[in-house]
Image (cartoon, coloured by chain):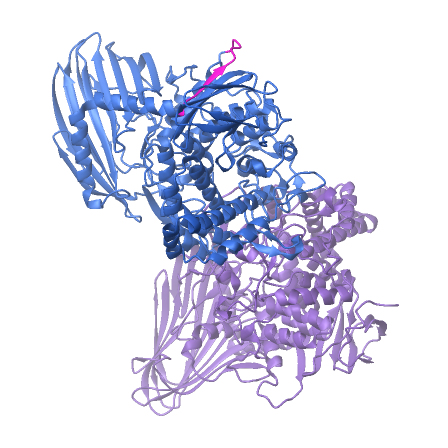
Chain colours: A purple, B blue
């Protein structure tokens, strides 16, 4: 259910605009929130949206994906097999600071007299722009125009353009362009979801040098020994006379430009910024690499960077955009869904675009919360979007998982199991979850990876990934399941899996979590199918696989037997799938009677209290009904949804999008829309109250799914693409494109009609409202939507 | 079951002796173990059995019960309601060191040429004696006789007598009597059961001064602010000429006696030692108090101390001894049970005698493992012995629990419950368990306290304790149960208790743990019964209770309803009581197939792995069958025991004694004896391999129970005393005494006959083999034991 505070449509402070997020005033009380909202990044590098001047700031942050410090996890009471190595993505050298002094008066936003203030995240340009007209205490009017960019094209490169114009006078002006190493890495004091902090310096200076307008600092993390080099260079253009002076130390560096500024004569500083880390290159080369990046950037110039960014984004939106036509109702919010959705997709881009050889942190690169760790979010919430719009990124992410397989094998042995167990949360491949009940016990991560691998392979037909990396993952994860579960005499010989935690972290260490068992079954089946296909048709790949895994074919029949014997909890009396063996025995939590300030429950109740109640943090059975919808009848889906929805607090941001999709499927239009809005506006309207800590990237991936799987009613079981559009009444039309097996399908649907057009490719079959159709290239196929707004009566089963 | 390594009778290195533990050689490799075996204490002060000279030592330790440092518990991942304050009993100033130099040659055991070595713990005298004949490298023969005592009579007082005689020569001799503050407090690195350590100094020097032969140091713990003063004074007697010199600093002090020793002229140092801590007195007075204790000790002299100790012990053994007559079989071990049992009882005395205003740590005062914390051990394993042999100590312990009631109320609120929840482990009353699954979740601690209260009141008829303190505990614990459980529609409206951990820590956070539900029922019933009795018959006490607790009588009927509706899991098919709702669903652990070096399981398996199996750390249902035996039929007991025994690893020392008692009851004589020996010799033969960390005090209490409840077959449901003796074939006779409602009952039983004698008191009813008998004062009643060795056929139900 959606709790009290969210029954009214969420609101935010940004004017409706299809392509921009605009802040029209300086809001000191939203400082921390806007640092997230205006964060920019490219999946390799992320900069929180602090102001150019560095002050004021709430939680400044500069993050390199995967650049982390390690620390020994300390337990109040330790036990065998607990995770040992904490990993925390570090806040690294801040290179974006540019401070301005006019008549030696510093420009400082909170006290400045502002005649104009506007900050704009431009999602077509891929820039963060700011325009300010400042009147100094002596009445001098100073126009400050800045633009910040993290290049999507050149992943090591960011830049700031900072232009100042004195409108009504002359004055001496100084611009200090700075580099600040050893940024604070504070931790969350009272919220377990926040990052572990370091009270002391963990980045130690290695090298520092200045040459002309170029500054380079490198630092090494104390325990992880990871090294980072950060360099900046400057171009300065003006008709005014100026001098410059560089000053550098191990942790701080600056170039100061002193200008005799004249009225109406702008001066313009371009600052190129680069980061290179030892995650991707040898330590000894980092400074050289930084220099090369800066050389190229200076040679090509700022305008080329901007143009490249715009091109990149044109392509991105062409592949990824969803156009939403809302039904005008005269309210200020018409167009808000479009804006929010684009911002959500833009954030995924910023988190994923250049995440090469790494994963996607739970907050992308917008904050340190969850310590920059990679979770199942990637596989379940982001991979669908990426698979259909940017398969090469999806491929990289799967290859990254494969690169951690050896550690997952080791982890399985640590927890006394065969096969491989992927870490619930990690940066470097080692399990970093220090609370096994809601961490290590989420064995479903294994099946989530296998699931997203299958989806990727089904939709891309990328057999090379499957054979070269995927199959090895499938073998080892299948082995884990077979070893973890057992055939239970008390369940008529069914294969049971005990002592695991499903997606819902409000019920931990349970027996036969329905989600886990269903997903494990899928994992076992796909592993068996893949291995047998390889043996039959790709003997050389099969030989390699056997060599790598020591596979014995008898294992395959064991996997199949376990899969086909898998116990799936079902309660005949209620006609629902219990979340686990004990779920229905628990007392129902009185959600309505719980004061709103006592949510999220986990911050106000001992885990034991939560665990002994029927109360759900996030969709669990409901998620299984989405991912493995063909394992449920529509009637079961309805009953399950009606049972679980009132028990769901939505204390996790991973829930609303899934609830929306299933609500749409079972014909609950009101909730489908309500949950979709909730997911869409989660961060822009700060529904959870914690956007200051970063974006909920997984939920953002979920918003794409609410449109495509929810409102357009797409399903893709075993790679077969079907649609049953179910637009809610306030949405007139949505349009989007999908890449499917190298072809490109455009979908446009209203509440009455859906049109499918193959804009690239040779021909494709799709299913619409249960009926199969053949699409010819470039010939739109228009079909009526049954029941006008999607018929729950009809179901999704395909006939014919 | 008893595992591989314990199938053979456990062995130890001490010659059989009814009253002494004698070490006949210096065994360097048993250093750490013998420091425990030869530890002495009085429940207030404990000294590990390191040598007089201070070296060599493995884990030296000087402990004051309850004197602790606090520390903020750090969690790998924190959550609401987790315990905050770690508490660790500190190793305080070591005052027992006396170093000896002959011709400037230090006496150092490992390298000394020893012509005689004997160390004796004398359990009748209550002293630790050592006799050594040392030949120095130059051939001088030095007789060293020392005696160490921690006074049972004067709890703040210990003393060392150290006498040296040169047998064949003269020589200059120095004796340095030392005080060493700021002892190390290292922690366990890889074993969660060990204490948290401090890597740095946590005791800060406050005062230090010397006067004549008197030295006083006081220290304060950094965070807890607890203060301790330690003082020593010396008497020195010799015919030889001598001088002395004192030397003192904040953390170290000594008096050095320099003697011109002459052949055959002994010199004799008496060192009195006292400790006073701010747990029992105002900080400002501690040094004064130390001085007063030393003044009195010097005045009375060492011999009086020794005599007082002997008197105290005569009384103790008179009240507490159990004589065991083994059937001679020609083996070296005949008499071993007697010796081990006495040593066990002696250790309880050393842990409990003067534990006034504090509890009894899990290791007594013999080690820092479990951090000096008080657990349920006291109530369930030690209180029976104390109630029947030393009711005033039992009373103190119950009053101590009551003193923590306010914190237990606070803790209940912290974990979102009403009433009071006693801490699973604590020193200062705050929950210190940093692993809730095997800590806080053991809500049964509440019922254990109520249970031991009832047993104490039943056996002593001490209504004043019940009304002044007990009733308040009962009200608040009953409130907790009522709030914790709920009426489950799915269990036909039965009252269910979910999300708790029973005694068996290998199954955590379960629903309807049978032990917990049975004990909670007893708690609720006794609370209701007590409150109603007070209302009817003691209206003034009742009024006070209502004033203190805000009790409403409607609560009482709610408790009764919950108690009478309590859900007790029972499996019809197997005819057993499942340990919890999910226990039987789990896979059975292959204990026989697990290599012996992989025990205890908790040190080699992730908790999740253990939790998903049917495998038991310690008696759980079996413990309930002992404590609440009248809730089970004999047939059920047999079936339960046969089911659970093979699943029980005995990884906890709390298990064997209980398994022995129930084995005896169900007629399994072999296991009754085997488990009894296992418990008896647990520490003396170092069965668990960890006696170096301290004594298993609870198991020691259990050994008394194996004799009285096991072999003599006593039961005391609701205060009614019954016996069904079941001596195993190798025990010819046991004799012991019990204090029951102010009367004194002597019991002597063989396999054929039992004799009951009321040595004090006016008359008493007992039940023997199911038949009621009236005992007249001082007239022995001899009765035949049915079936010769205890008939399982007969059961324990009383007829008539």
Is B325 covered by the magenta stretch? yes
Q: Is residue A155 left or right of residue B126?
A: right
Between A4 and B76, the one nearer to me in the picture: A4
For the C terminus of chain A, the quadrant is: bottom right
User: Residue B530, percent across and down?
Assistant: 45, 47
The outermost residue toward the right is A800
Q: Residue at x 62, y 26 (%)?
A: B792
The outermost residue toward the top is B168
Residue A249 shows in the view: yes
User: Residue A480, percent across and down?
Assistant: 67, 46
Q: Which residues are magenta?
A: B320-331
The outermost residue toward the bottom is A168
Between A537 and A770, the one nearer to me in the picture: A770
Q: Is residue A651 left or right of residue A30?
A: right
Q: Is residue A527 left or right of residue A267?
A: right
User: Residue A573, percent across and down?
Assistant: 74, 58
In this rendering, is residue A313 above or below B284? below
Between A205 and B269, the one nearer to me in the picture: B269
User: Residue B10, percent across and down?
Assistant: 51, 21
Q: Residue at x 34, y 18 (%)?
A: B119
Residue B33 shows in the view: no
Q: Residue at x 55, y 45 (%)?
A: B516
């Amino acid at each position: 259910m959606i709790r009290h505070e969210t029954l009214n449509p969420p609101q935010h402070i940004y004017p409706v605009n299809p392509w921009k997020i605009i802040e029209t005033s300086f809001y000191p009380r939203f400082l921390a929130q806007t640092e997230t909202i205006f964060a920019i990044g490219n999946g390799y590098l992320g900069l929180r949206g602090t102001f150019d001047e560095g002050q004021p700031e709430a939680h400044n942050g500069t993050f390199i994906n995967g650049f982390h410090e390690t620390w020994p996890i300390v337990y109040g009471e330790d036990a065998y097999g607990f995770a040992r190595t904490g990993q925390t993505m570090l806040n690294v050298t801040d290179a974006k600071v540019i401070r301005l002094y006019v008549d030696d008066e510093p420009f400082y936003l909170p006290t400045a007299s502002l005649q104009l203030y506007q900050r704009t995240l431009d999602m077509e340009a891929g820039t963060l722009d700011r325009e300010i007209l400042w009147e100094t205490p002596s009445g001098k009017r100073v126009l400050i125009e800045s633009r910040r960019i993290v290049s999507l094209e050149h992943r090591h490169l960011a830049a700031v353009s900072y232009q100042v114009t004195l409108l009504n006078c002359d004055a001496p002006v100084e611009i200090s362009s700075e580099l600040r190493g050893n940024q604070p890495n504070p931790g969350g004091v009272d919220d377990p979801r926040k990052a572990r902090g370091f009270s002391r310096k963990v980045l130690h200076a290695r090298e520092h040098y200045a040459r002309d307008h170029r500054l380079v600092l490198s630092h090494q993390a104390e325990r992880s020994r990871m090294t980072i080099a950060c360099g900046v260079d400057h171009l300065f253009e003006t008709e005014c006379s100026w001098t410059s002076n560089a000053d550098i130390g191990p942790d701080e560096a600056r170039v100061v430009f002193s200008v005799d500024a004249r009225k109406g004569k702008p001066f313009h500083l371009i600052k190129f910024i680069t980061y290179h880390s030892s995650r991707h290159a040898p330590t000894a080369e980092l400074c050289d690499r930084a220099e090369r990046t800066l050389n190229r950037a200076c040679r090509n110039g700022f305008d080329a960077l901007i143009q490249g960014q715009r091109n990149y984004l044109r392509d991105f939106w062409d592949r990824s955009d969803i156009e939403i036509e809302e039904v005008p109702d005269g309210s200020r919010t018409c167009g808000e869904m479009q804006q929010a959705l684009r911002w959500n997709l833009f954030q995924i881009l910023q988190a994923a675009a250049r995440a090469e050889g790494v994963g996607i942190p739970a907050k992308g690169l917008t904050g340190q919360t969850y310590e920059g760790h990679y979770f199942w979010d990637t596989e379940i919430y982001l991979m669908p979007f990426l698979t259909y719009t940017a398969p090469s990124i999806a491929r990289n992410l799967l290859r990254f998982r494969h690169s951690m397989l050896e550690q997952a094998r080791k982890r399985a042995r640590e927890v006394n199991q065969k096969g491989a167990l992927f870490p619930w949360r990690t940066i470097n491949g080692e399990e970093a979850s220090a609370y096994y009940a809601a961490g290590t016990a989420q064995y479903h991560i294994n099946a989530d990876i296998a699931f997203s691998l299958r989806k990727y392979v089904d939709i891309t037909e990328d057999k090379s990934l499957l054979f070269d990396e995927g199959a090895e993952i499938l073998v080892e994860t299948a082995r884990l399941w077979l070893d973890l579960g057992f055939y239970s005499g008390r369940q008529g010989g069914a294969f049971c899996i005990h002592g695991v935690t499903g997606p819902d972290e409000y019920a931990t260490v349970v027996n036969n979590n329905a989600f886990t068992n269903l997903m494990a079954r899928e994992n076992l089946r796909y592993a068996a199918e893949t291995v047998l296909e390889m043996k039959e048709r790709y003997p050389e790949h099969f030989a390699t696989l056997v060599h790598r895994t020591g596979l014995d074919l008898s294992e395959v029949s064991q996997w199949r037997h376990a899969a086909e014997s898998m116990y799936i909890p079902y309660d005949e009396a209620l006609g629902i799938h219990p979340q686990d063996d004990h779920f229905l025995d628990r007392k129902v939590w009185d959600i309505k009677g719980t004061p709103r300030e006592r949510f999220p429950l986990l911050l106000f109740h001992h885990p034991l209290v939560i665990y002994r109640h029927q109360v759900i943090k996030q969709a669990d059975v409901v998620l299984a009904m989405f991912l493995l919808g063909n394992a449920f009848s529509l009637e079961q889906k309805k009953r399950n949804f009606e049972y679980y929805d009132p028990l769901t607090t939505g204390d996790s941001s991973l829930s609303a999008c899934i609830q929306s999709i299933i609500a749409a499927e079972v014909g609950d239009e009101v909730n489908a829309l309500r949950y979709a809005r909730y997911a869409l506006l989660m961060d822009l309207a700060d529904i959870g109250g914690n956007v200051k800590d970063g974006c909920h990237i997984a939920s953002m991936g979920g918003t794409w799914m609410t449109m495509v799987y929810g409102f357009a009613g797409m399903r893709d079981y075993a790679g077969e693409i079907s649609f049953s559009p179910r637009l809610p009444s306030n949405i007139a039309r949505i349009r989007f494109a999908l890449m499917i097996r190298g072809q490109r399908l455009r979908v446009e649907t209203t509440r009455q009609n859906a049109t499918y057009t193959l804009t690239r490719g040779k021909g494709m079959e799709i299913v619409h409202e249960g009926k199969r159709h053949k699409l010819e290239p470039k010939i739109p196929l228009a079909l009526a939507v049954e029941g006008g707004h999607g018929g729950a009566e009809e179901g999704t089963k395909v006939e014919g």
